[in-house]
Image (cartoon, rainbow, N blue to C red):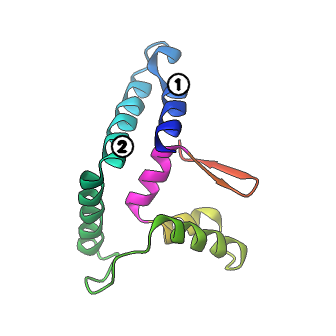
Amino acid sequence: MIRAAYKALVQKYHPDRHHGSVRHELVLTALNKAQDVLLDPDRRAAHDQWIRREEIRLGYRDPEDQPAPGLRVRLQLLASGVREGGLSFGEAWLTYLTGAQRLAVGAVGVVAWGSVSVAWW
């Protein structure tokens, strides 16, 4: 899934398709780095730990908290927060997904949610 989404995003944002746009070169660089991290279990785990330390440092998480639930559980919470909790999608996105999970979902490209597709870019 990561590779297929990566390929689709590279085709969409490749600088050659946008007359050598510097913005698109930056997007392509970010996509390459995100894919490298997501596909390497050790680097992905290290990045997730860094995100947790940053959340603690910034006061977004109590150091005594258990590790956050995985992405699947958080996406289910997000959907529930919108359907039943009265949150806007943006509020639920920021509430239920960690920075690393938002990055991962954004790097993958699109989250299909029922009949609604939400693109990060």
SS under mark 2: helix
Q: Is residue 43 left or right of residue 25?
A: left
Identify the amino acid type marked 1. Gln
Measuring 67% from the left and 79% from the top, which residue is drawn there?
A: 85
Q: In the rendered view, tell whether residue 109 sits above or below residue 70.
A: above
Give x and y (percent) for residue 12.
55, 27
Q: Are marks 1 and 2 in contact (CB under 8 Å)?
A: no
Give x and y (percent) for residue 113.
68, 57
Residue located beneath label 1 in the image: 11
Q: In the rendered view, tell whether residue 36 sits above or below residue 64.
A: above
Q: Which numbered tag is attached to residue 34?
A: 2
Q: Is residue 7 left or right of residue 117?
A: left
Identify the amino acid type marked 2. Ala
Measuring 49% from the left and 52% from the top, which residue is drawn there?
A: 105
Q: Residue furthest right?
A: 115
| C-alpha separation, residue under disc 1 versus residue under disc 2 | 16 Å
* Residue 108: in magenta span: yes
Where does the magenta region start and end?
98-109
User: Sequence order check: which comes first, mark 1 or mark 2?
Assistant: 1
Give x and y (percent) for residue 66.
33, 83
75 or 61: which is nearer to us? Answer: 75
SS under mark 1: helix
**Residue 44 falls in image quadrant:** bottom left
